[in-house]
């Protein structure tokens, strides 16, 4: 084995969380990141809840938080809003992050724990001995090198190249891919105390989000299900059309453009192999309803890091040894991911008229908390017919 | 028969290097080295990448602004 027990490909939240917990528990860890700056360019809507941060020992610094919101606002296709207030959400405020700083905070945790980090270093492929992965071929500042290790961690995001090279099945059906575009729009008028979600045909099979960065600036973006797209550049056309339709946004101008895709699939069958492990977006651990990936990445990263530290102590990076991670992340996330994937499969079929009725019903009956299940249950109490498609979830 | 001229390219004037195409490619034939998008020999010309690209940067070779 070389200088490292673990090489992590990708320095997003999944990679740096894995590195942090592995290094903290005694493994020699290297993170490689192809870009020149951690956290940039941003590929994210940046909205999170605060509830899970303590469980992974993340203490947000002031720079990482762009804005705190007191609730969520859902907007029906006919324009009717439904407010999910702080009180209804159990005093659970939402946060809009500044990922440029948040990702650096997580990287600092990893470095402080003892992990090594190289920027401008791309993974080119895996080194194998038989079926076992024993390192990664990388290119760093124009030099190609082979880095040997006990386990390569694929934390390379939606692209998931490490998984593909390792032969782990991560490919996605078109209906399980949402393609996204976002502008950070400034000079807008908005209800900056709420994260807003616009439902229905403004974003087929997805939604429009508007997450405030400050009083006059918000991340305004949308995702559309790939199976609903026919022509090149359609997603940009949807977003431009939405902004033009909103008087408060029309005079806004973008401070940046963010593009990307997210998986909205059921949990995949396998995320480990001999000498290889996938975590975060690359392991398709994104919530299929919200498209959110940060919390799951940090939670799975902790399990991955602890498993890898154990494997280092035992000198065993076999699939069997890494199953502690496979089982561990599934215990934490799998039921929720599967349930939300099932719900997504139904939600994408709803008409604008049905969404209108759902929002109308929520305004009549209220809802206990911001969860798909709570919303469906609230609708069921008044209009069981609207949610009969979801009966197996309820 | 697939001809060289029918292959795809990323328009450098539009591509935001986000990797949406790479992660969606069913034949694993795309590679993004930070800002350079490469198409491999395994490309079946299914053109999923042309739809998944949020800004419509992927097009038939010859139609691209090569910078």
Image (spheres, grey):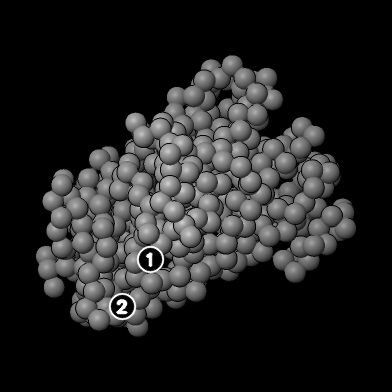
- Left or right, A56 with respect to A359, comes to left
Q: Image check: A337 left or right of A13?
A: right
Q: Position of residue A168 (x, y in %)?
A: 41, 71
Inspect this view and state whether residue A28 appears: yes
**Is residue A48 at least partly visible in the picture?**
no
Instruction: Tell me the subunit letter for badge 1.
Output: A
Query: Where residue A176 sits: x, y (%)?
Result: 58, 58
List the residue tagged with mark 2.
A274
User: Neighbour class for label 1 at 10 Å: few (<14), some, many (≥20)?
Assistant: many
In this view, A152 is above or below A223:
below
Which mark is nearer the camera, 2 or 1? 1
**Quadrant of the image occupied by residue A208:** top right
- x then y, percent, for residue A78: 80, 34
Label ID, residue B34: none
For image coordinates 31% across by 71% down, the residue present is A276
Vertical relation: A129 (above or below) A61: below
Looking at the rendered structure, the secondary structure element under dot 2 is: loop
Do tags 2 and 1 sit on the same chain?
yes
Quarter in which the C terminus of chain A is drawn: bottom right
Instruction: Work out whether residue A356 or residue A394 is closer to the camera in this orientation and state it.
Output: A356
Callout 2: chain: A
For image coordinates 22% across by 69% down, the residue present is A127
Tell me the quadrant of the picture where the N terminus of chain A can be found.
bottom left
Residue at image coords 88%, 58%: A385
Tell me the distance, in whole angstroms, between the alpha carbons under discs 2 and 1: 12 Å
Q: Which residue is mark 1?
A: A163
């Amino acid at each position: 084995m070389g200088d490292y027990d673990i090489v992590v490909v990708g320095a997003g939240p999944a990679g740096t969380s894995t590195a942090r917990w592995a290094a903290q528990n005694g493994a020699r860890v290297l993170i490689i990141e192809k870009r020149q700056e951690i956290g940039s360019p941003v590929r994210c809507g940046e909205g999170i809840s605060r509830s899970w941060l303590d469980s992974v020992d993340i203490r947000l610094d002031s720079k990482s938080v762009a804005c705190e919101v007191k609730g969520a606002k859902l907007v029906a296709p006919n324009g009717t809003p439904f407010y999910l207030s702080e009180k209804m959400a159990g005093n659970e405020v939402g946060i809009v992050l500044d990922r440029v700083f948040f990702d650096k905070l997580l990287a600092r945790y990893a470095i402080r724990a003892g992990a090594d980090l190289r920027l401008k270093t791309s993974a080119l492929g895996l080194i194998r001995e038989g079926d076992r992965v024993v390192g990664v071929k990388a290119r760093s500042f124009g030099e190609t090198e082979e880095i040997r290790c006990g386990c390569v961690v694929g934390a390379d995001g939606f692209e998931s190249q490490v998984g593909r090279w390792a032969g782990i099945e991560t490919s996605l059906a078109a209906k399980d891919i949402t393609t996204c575009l976002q502008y950070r729009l400034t000079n807008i008028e908005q209800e900056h105390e709420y994260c807003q979600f616009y439902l229905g045909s403004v974003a087929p099979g997805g939604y429009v989000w508007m997450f405030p960065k400050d009083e006059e600036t918000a991340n305004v973006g949308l995702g559309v299900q790939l199976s609903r797209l026919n022509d090149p550049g359609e997603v940009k056309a949807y977003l431009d059309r939405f902004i033009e339709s909103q008087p408060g946004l029309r005079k806004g101008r973008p401070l940046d453009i963010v593009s990307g895709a997210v998986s909205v699939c059921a949990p995949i069958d396998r995320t480990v192999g001999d000498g290889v492990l996938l975590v975060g977006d690359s392991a398709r651990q994104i919530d299929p309803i919200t498209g959110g990936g940060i919390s799951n990445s940090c939670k799975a990263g902790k399990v991955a890091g602890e498993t890898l530290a154990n494997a280092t102590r035992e000198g065993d990076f076999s699939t069997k040894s890494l199953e502690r991670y496979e089982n561990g992340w599934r215990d934490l996330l799998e039921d929720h991911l599967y349930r939300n994937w099932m719900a997504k499969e139904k939600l994408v079929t709803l008409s604008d008229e049905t969404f209108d009725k759902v929002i109308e019903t929520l305004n009549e009956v209220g809802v206990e908390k911001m969860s798909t299940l709570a919303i469906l249950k609230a609708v069921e109490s008044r209009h069981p017919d609207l949610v009969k498609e979801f009966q197996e979830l309820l | 028969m697939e001809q060289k001229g029918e292959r795809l390219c990323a328009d450098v004037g539009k591509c935001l290097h986000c990797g949406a195409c790479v992660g969606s490619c069913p034949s694993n034939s795309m590679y993004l080295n930070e800002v350079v998008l490469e198409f491999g020999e395994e490309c079946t010309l299914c053109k999923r990448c042309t739809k998944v690209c949020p800004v419509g940067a992927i097009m038939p070779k010859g139609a691209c602004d090569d910078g």
